Amino acid sequence: MSFQYEFPRPALAVDCVIFGLDEGDLKVMLIRRDLPPFEGRWALPGGFVRMDETTDEAARRELREETGLDHVFLEQLYTFSDLQRDPRERVVSVAYYALVRLTNFKVHATTDAAEAVWFKMCETPPLCFDHPLIVETAYDRLKAKVCYQPIGFELLPKNFTLTQLQKMYETVLARPIDKRNFRKKILSMGILQETGEMQSGVAHRAARLYRFNEKKYHTMVKKGFHFEI
Amino acid sequence: MSFQYEFPRPALAVDCVIFGLDEGDLKVMLIRRDLPPFEGRWALPGGFVRMDETTDEAARRELREETGLDHVFLEQLYTFSDLQRDPRERVVSVAYYALVRLTNFKVHATTDAAEAVWFKMCETPPLCFDHPLIVETAYDRLKAKVCYQPIGFELLPKNFTLTQLQKMYETVLARPIDKRNFRKKILSMGILQETGEMQSGVAHRAARLYRFNEKKYHTMVKKGFHFEI
DNA sequence: CCAAAAGTGTTCTCCATACACCCATGC
DNA sequence: GCATGGGTGTATGGAGAACACTTTTGG
């Protein structure tokens, strides 16, 4: 029955690319490795998959253990299996990407495990393993998917202004968007709900706060609605 | 160094969903298993990943060994890792999907290994493991991707008529397309090349044969062109 | 009163859609 | 000559893009 020891097997790991939005910057969370190989160098949070968990569960566990994050948007990205991607031995890694509401708890995401730090996407330090490729793949996916699925809301606080929403898209897509056209379009979709509340603590006219109406979105999708920026 | 035997590891496999187009039908290639578990039942071609090959290479090898197919379009689909997906033990599978020019060599794709048969998508027999989920995932991906990447040509012969091309999209997307609008749009993209040759052996007016101009497509993509049906 | 961002409409262009008839060929 | 698919144009409506000024608020 058990061919467990009959044939050698690659080790199976998960790695997570965690994106957060900090004002006008897209950021990625990296950890400084406290173990060989590449001790002291920067890498993606990740680790080996256990026998009693799916890769999704492993990714969530690593996220929790290494960065303290929980209940975040998490999606499988791609599986990387190059023979030389880990200098120790053959390791196949199922990569995930996560989207985090960074605005709330800011850059407090270090834990006992290792040093975890948010880096601007454009200022990431040299990474070990094939993690540069994984980050690039994740960023490409994010840019593509944010246009046709309402996942961008995961990067914002629950309540947000239209300007915040627009700025999120401008940041992720790295291109300017026309304010009036953007508002016309996003409001006409009917997936935003006015909270009735207003922005506060700003030194200018307060903006209306909106919320993503997920239920309505799902209802509309069933009727053929297709989100698109 | 080797923690090969320090921790138990899931087995790592690949599975392939192979799509082909036969006149107006989208087909999938399945094999009848000649080994337990599920001996005699239908499943996707696939097998375990060896230590000296990437998952891409494993998928291509299995394709070759089990179906005789080579040099086909192959893309990673998703990694399935449910704990109970294989009754023997823990097996994680990296799934792929392939697109095949079925028109040329028709249904001759059986080999020495096992019985390999093309089934209409709508007439697939009961599958074992989690293969129904994998097939569904692959079909969703195909329907989505065929709309914004020129992968549909992989299902047609090198030279094809506009009607064949249109019928391919109608079959994959399972919806009718207006002939005049389709021709206008696809020709205006400038990615098709007239071969100068004509269809032959048909009992009606012969149609012009076109070819997908891949080089031109890639040049145009670099300049910002975006394919869309 | 000044700085800073909120909020708002119109015009134009282009593309998606809807739609029907004649043409060429093999049998 | 007839059956079969090949090949073609136009009119309409709707959506995306471009574009600038007034309003509100806090300091």
Image: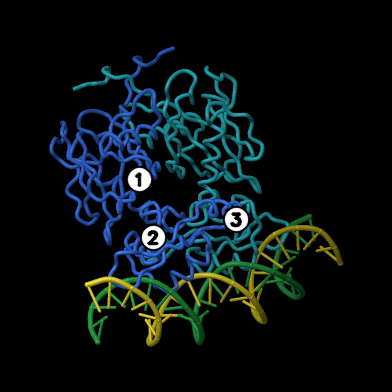
Chain colours: A blue, B cyan, C green, D yellow
- x and y percentages locating residue A134 in the rendered image: 30, 45
Relative to B171, say whether B78 is above or below: above
Q: Quadrant of residue A88?
A: top left
Q: Which three-letter amino acid code belongs to the residue tagged 2?
A: Phe
- x and y percentages locating residue B102 in the rendered image: 57, 43
Query: Is the residue under label 3 in contact with that under label 2 (CB below 8 Å)?
Result: no
Q: Chain of mark 3?
A: A
Q: Nearer the viewer, residue A180 or B62?
A: A180
Marks 1 and 3 share the same chain: yes
Q: Earlier in the sequence, mark 2 or mark 3?
A: 2
Relative to D8, say whether B186 is above or below: above
Q: Which three-letter amino acid code belongs to the residue tagged 1?
A: Ala
Q: Nearer the viewer, residue B23 or A153?
A: A153
Q: Which residue is mark 1?
A: A98
Spatial CA span between label 2 and label 3 = 26 Å
Q: Which residue is mark 2?
A: A160
Q: Earlier in the sequence, mark 1 or mark 2?
A: 1
- Number of the label disc, if any, that sits on residue A224: 3
Q: Which three-letter amino acid code belongs to the residue tagged 3?
A: Gly
